[in-house]
Image (cartoon, rainbow, N blue to C red):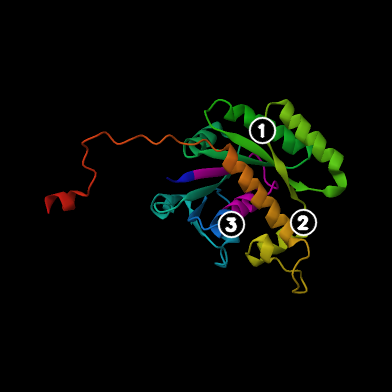
Amino acid sequence: MIVFVTTFGQKGGVAKTCTSIHLAAHWANAGRSVVLVDADRNRSATAYASRGLLPFAVVPMEAAAKATRSADIVVTDGQASSNEEELKNLVEGSDFIVLPTTAQSRSIELTVEMACMLNKFDIPYAALIVKADTRKKSSIQIAREILQGFDIEVLRTEIPLLNAFENAETEGVTVDRAVTKNGRSDRRRMSGFYAYSKACDEIELLMPHRKVIPMPIGWNVSRLEDRCA
């Protein structure tokens, strides 16, 4: 059964595409069949994947129906928008929504607004604090408390602020393969990838478990051509 995870935000600069890429990469490296659907008009995920170095396919929204047929997990990089109709369309195609959020006041404000819109739908979601500067732990804690004060689920994992993420995007690879401008492996690259892996573990625990509807007794579910034979 396919699981659909969507990253969504109201503004750029909150590592939305980076989050989509690394969630997909974690599950792909874990042996899942993963497809990332680029639903952002800027086609940021498509540009990121243009070198063909990611461990999963990235397809435009128009090609999603065919490309995702055999997938275990579909990650959608949603449009950065506050349009309620666009949000509704993405919600209808999702099992879980991730809201990347920085500790900046404007980002927190927009995430709260987004959560208010999502509350109109029957969809589980959680905020993920990204670009977390370890030198500003108090700001991160305040951001977490504000979000939780609005009854927003906030993942315990925080994605650190690392140059390695920028280096990885330049090279078209995930952060665990990032190198510096001198061609050396980035010292902190694995901490970034590990953080996204931990976020994936949390997301899986928060995802609703779909009920499997038993097939009525007596139904013939074999292929039609087999029955004719």
- Marks 2 and 3 sit apart, C-alpha to C-alpha, by 18 Å
Q: Give the number of the disc on residue 115.
A: none
x, y percentage for residue 161?
A: 77, 52
The crowding category of the residue bearing disc 2, from other C-alpha atoms within 10 Å (few below 14, some 14 to 19, many at least 20), is some
Give, as a three-letter code, the residue at label 3.
Ala
Q: Which residue is mark 3?
A: 25
Q: Quadrant of residue 191?
A: bottom right
The residue tagged with tag 3: helix, strand or loop?
Answer: helix
The tag earlier along the polypeptide, 2 or 3, is 3
Q: Which residue is mark 2?
A: 162
Q: Is residue 54 above or below residue 101?
A: below
Q: Which residue: 83% across, 48% down?
A: 134
- Marks 2 and 1 sit apart, C-alpha to C-alpha, by 24 Å
x, y percentage for residue 106?
A: 75, 36
x, y percentage for residue 55?
A: 55, 62
Q: Which residue is mark 1?
A: 153
The tag earlier along the polypeptide, 1 or 3, is 3
Q: Which residue: 58% across, 57% down?
A: 25
- The magenta segment is 4-25
x, y percentage for residue 11?
A: 67, 42
> Foreground: 24 or 206?
206
- Marks 1 and 3 sit apart, C-alpha to C-alpha, by 23 Å
Q: Is residue 55 above or below residue 88?
A: below
